[in-house]
Amino acid sequence: MADNTENFDQLRKLLALKRHEQPPPGYFDKFSKHVIMRLHAGDKGEVETFSERLFNEAPWLQAILHAFQTKPVLAGGSGAAACALVLALIVVSGRSGSGDMTPGGGLAVSGGTGSDLTAQPLANSAVLVTSPDFSSTNGLSPDAAAALFSQMPDSSQRVRY
Amino acid sequence: MIMTDPAPAKAVKKTPGDEPSPMAEVSEDQLVSRSRRGDTRAYDELVRRYQERIYATVYHMTSNHEDANDLAQEAFIKAYYALKSFKGGSSFYTWVYRIAVNKTINFLKQRKHRSVLSLNDLDVNAEHDPDLVALVSDKTPRRDASLAELQEKLNEAMQKLSESHRLVVTLHDVQGMSHEEIAKIMDCNIGTVRSRLFYARQQLQAYLSNYLK
């Protein structure tokens, strides 16, 4: 350890060389004037990129990324944990939502028999009809068809030719 | 451990022939307050107080005078427009230092594989620095040529360090800041500063082994 300390002393003496590096004579006499001139001209400097702004406003994010860069095991473990979480969410949502065929928007018609259809207006104006009696191979009974069109949402209007 | 902010710069001393600055005796808090209200003369004084240290840090990080000039100016311009968000939890000096450091690191990351040296000249005192003289071989006929070579090799070695390691060496070994001051600027704990400094010195020692006796 003493040898290391002594070698660092030599290194530190060498690093002191950088203190002798100076900008051209008179440089600092004009520096502040240039800054103020740019301010008066409305110069706001270089526009920050999205990543620069993100890191400036969330320095913890930069610390996390730095940790990932310096410790690949940590990055791999985090990635594996994220994948496991996504898979778990897919499995859980699949189990709880297996009987629900309706999408988030639109008009859902919950089915019983073909003549007993109910319509529930939702946010979108699209109409979606689902019924266990209807399939691509079975035909639509006249009663069922009439029941469908008799229960249009209030916001819709019949077309008149 | 109580970490204190670095000592604020004293008012710029006037040299013979310079006009005395009317803001020279105004406190930093007052200058910040006036600058917030759009007083660019007050901000001019703030820039004067810290321009050398900010420029030096940026220059030692980039080893390029033109880039350092642009980045240092950009840092002060950004700081001016961000004054409203300066809450006074740290000194203005620490706050603007962080802006300059972050801006420089972002710039270096974008420039990662295109390092171009544009070194400042060494002042006349370098030739008379006993430590540097001792490092240069006595057999070299032109000592100034050897110093120039040493300067180039040193800067090349610095550029091989990561940004965070180069920064801690710059702030401590080149600019003489304490571990506490560096921890404030880098927003990390003192232990991190010490470990980065040790690692950076090890790396530099390896790169410069031919020049260290």
Image: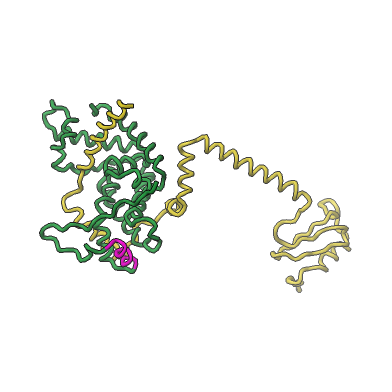
Residue A83 in view: yes
Residue located 16% across and 39% down the image: B126
Residue located 11% across and 60% down the image: B17
In the rendered structure, the answer to whether residue B137 lies left or right of residue A36 reads left
Is B30 one of the magenta-colored residues? Answer: yes
Classify A64 as above or below B143. below
In the rendered structure, the answer to whether residue A157 lies left or right of residue B105 reads right
When asked about the image quadrant of residue B177, the answer is top left
In depth, the one of B87 and A96 nearer the eye is B87
- What letter labels the chain drawn in green? B
Quadrant of the rendering where the C terminus of chain A is positioned: bottom right
Residue B106 in view: no
**Extent of the magenta region:** B27-36
Quadrant of the rendering where the N terminus of chain A is positioned: top left
- What letter labels the chain drawn in yellow? A
Is A100 one of the magenta-colored residues? Answer: no
When asked about the image quadrant of residue B199, the answer is top left
Classify B204 as above or below B175. above
Magenta segment, principal secondary structure?
helix
In depth, the one of A43 and B201 nearer the eye is B201
Colouring scheme, one of rainbow, by chain, secondary structure, one colour: by chain
* Rendered location of residue A19, percent (x, y): 22, 42
* Rendered location of residue B64, percent (x, y): 27, 45
In the rendered structure, the answer to whether residue B62 lies left or right of residue A154 reads left
Classify B180 as above or below A2. below
Name the residue furthest bottom.
Answer: A160
Residue located 33% across and 69% down the image: B37
Residue located 27% across and 65% down the image: B42
Looking at the image, how many numbered discs can be counted on the residues? 0
